[in-house]
Image (cartoon, rainbow, N blue to C red):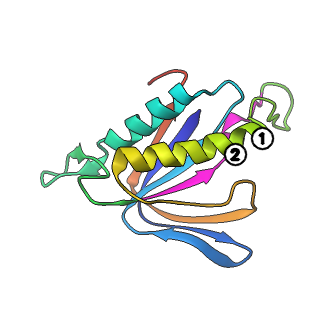
Amino acid sequence: MRAIIQRVTKATVVINEKTKAEIGLGLLILLGIEEADTIEDIEWLSAKIAHLRIFNDANNLMNLSIQDVNGDILVVSQFTLFASTKKGNRPSFINAAKPDIAIPMYGLFIQHLSKETGKEIHCGIFGADMKIGLINDGPVTIFIDSKNRE
């Protein structure tokens, strides 16, 4: 499971020219799921994100978590995080989980993240053509892969 976590002052998801979700200060999480992902990946990643200290404290140091700043969270499915560009110029997405696996895993991730943070999680619609708008604060962008545990 892979996640791109962006600290934002605003983020939106628009589907068919209608705003599906919008947040202010918080995290925009682009989530990629692969066939090999398990509940352990979900539990580890959701806990890691819930406690990630990437918001500035009074001394302008990254010491605060999403709960500390009472921020919002927006999660968007992003199968392209498993793109392979090893051969040729057209990416292969063979490692991305198919919808029958990815959709339930996406739902479980959202549930676990909500439980870890005590927050409602805003989200896009799995598989929809979405337009994502954001104001990256910092900019701060973190990449986490649950298989590497980094």
Let me know if residue 2 is in the magenta part: no
Q: Is residue 123 left or right of residue 119?
A: right
Residue 117 position (above or below residue 37): below
Q: Quadrant of residue 79?
A: top right
Residue 31: where, in percent of width, then height? 59, 44
Q: Residue furthest top?
A: 148
Tell me the tag on residue 103.
2
Magenta segment = 73-85
Residue type of the residue flagged with mark 2: Ile
Q: Residue furthest left?
A: 59
Q: Is residue 123 left or right of residue 70?
A: right
Look at the numbered disc 1 and give the secondary structure of its residue.
helix
The answer to whether the residue labelled 1 contacts the one labelled 2, judged by CB atoms less than 8 Å apart, is yes
Residue type of the residue flagged with mark 1: Asp
Gap between marks 1 and 2, in whole Å? 6 Å
Residue 54 position (above or below residue 129): above
In depth, the one of 59 and 34 nearer the eye is 34
Where is mark 1, residue-wise?
Answer: 100
Q: Residue at x 69, y 31 (%)?
A: 34
Q: Residue at x 25, y 57 (%)?
A: 69
Tell me the tag on residue 82.
none
